Amino acid sequence: MKITVLGLGEMGSALASALLNAGYPVTVWNRSAEKARPLVAEGARLATSPEEAVAAGEVVIVNVKGGTVAAELLRTAGLVLPGRTVVDVTDGTSAQVEVTAELVTGHGADYLHGQIMTIAPAVGSPDAVVFYGGPRQVFDRCEPVLRVLGGRATHVSSNPGVSVLYGMAVHDIMWGLLNGFLHAAALLNNAGIRIGDFAEQAEPSLTALPSLFPMLADEIDRAEYAVPFGALQHHLPSVDDLIAESRTRGIDVDLPTYTRNIVAEAIGTGHGKDSYAWLVQHFGGR
């Protein structure tokens, strides 16, 4: 299967290199041809235009700066899109993905959107996760290529925009966990406690946190939140203690104060005996 890669930034170059290492014939294009030199040295063919690049590939992988740029690039190559499969792994919003999907399929090509959940050096590894959205039969046909890019290539929906939402959700959770850890680290550091000692000794508690996600997910999907233990009302005193300790030590209190505000609001509206999952409604869930 002949592959084209449009966009040779850090990630696009890693994708092209992984495909070359797997033995695929690869054509590349980038606005700055200079970035293609290492890949040409590895055996890639350099195209002089997006149209030439797209025409050379059965599968066209796009990784550029933003969904709007991706759509414009594919619009430019519209006349040579028919019969090809576009795998767009450009970051953007689900609305941008829908626009690009409509553009590509309107030109008679198949479309998958992939959300890469790893950094460039890990592209091509067996554990690299990439979420894909689009027709299942298209994913199945391209799966050998997709697994070269990441061993854990996962089809999540026939709607290409869902892959973007999966990626955003993982990042959303990641930033929340990282910010919580760093706030805690600042507090411990102020008290003269080595963060490494804490991480080692608290590991059972820390690693247990993600195990709560399936339970919370089930409560949210069922929209049933009443629980006999661990209800919201029991969180408030602990948050108050954290805020008091942080303030005493000169540690920023914005993060725990935000948590306190939404917990207190829920309790004040009669949800003190509901689980923590009820707070999804504060963020606009049901």
Image: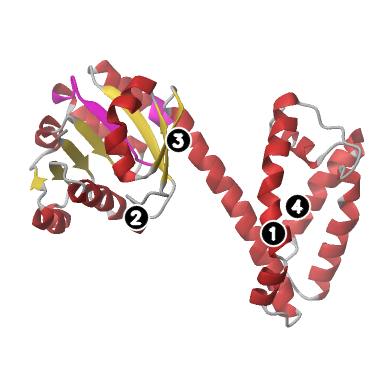
Work out how far the residue at label 2 is from the one at label 4, CA to CA, in angstroms. 34 Å
What range is drawn magenta here? 80-98
Vertical relation: 72 (above or below) 254: above
Nearer-the-camera pick, 236 or 123:
123
Work out how far the residue at label 1 is from the one at label 2, CA to CA, in angstroms. 27 Å
Q: Position of residue 201 (x, y in %)?
A: 72, 70
Displayed quadrant of residue 48: top left
Q: Which residue is mark 4?
A: 258
Image position of 194 (left or right of 82): right
**Labels 1 and 3: the sequence-earlier one:** 3
**Labels 1 and 4: the sequence-earlier one:** 1
Q: Which residue is mark 2?
A: 120
Q: Residue 93 bears which disc, if any?
A: 3
Work out how far the residue at label 1 is from the one at label 4, CA to CA, in angstroms. 21 Å
User: Are the two marked residues, 1 and 2, in contact with CB atoms closer than 8 angstroms?
Assistant: no
The image shows a total of numbered marks equal to 4
Image position of 205 (left or right of 34): right
Q: Which residue is mark 1?
A: 206
Vertical relation: 130 (above or below) 98: below
Check disc 3 and give the amino acid type. Thr
Work out how far the residue at label 2 is from the one at label 3, CA to CA, in angstroms. 21 Å
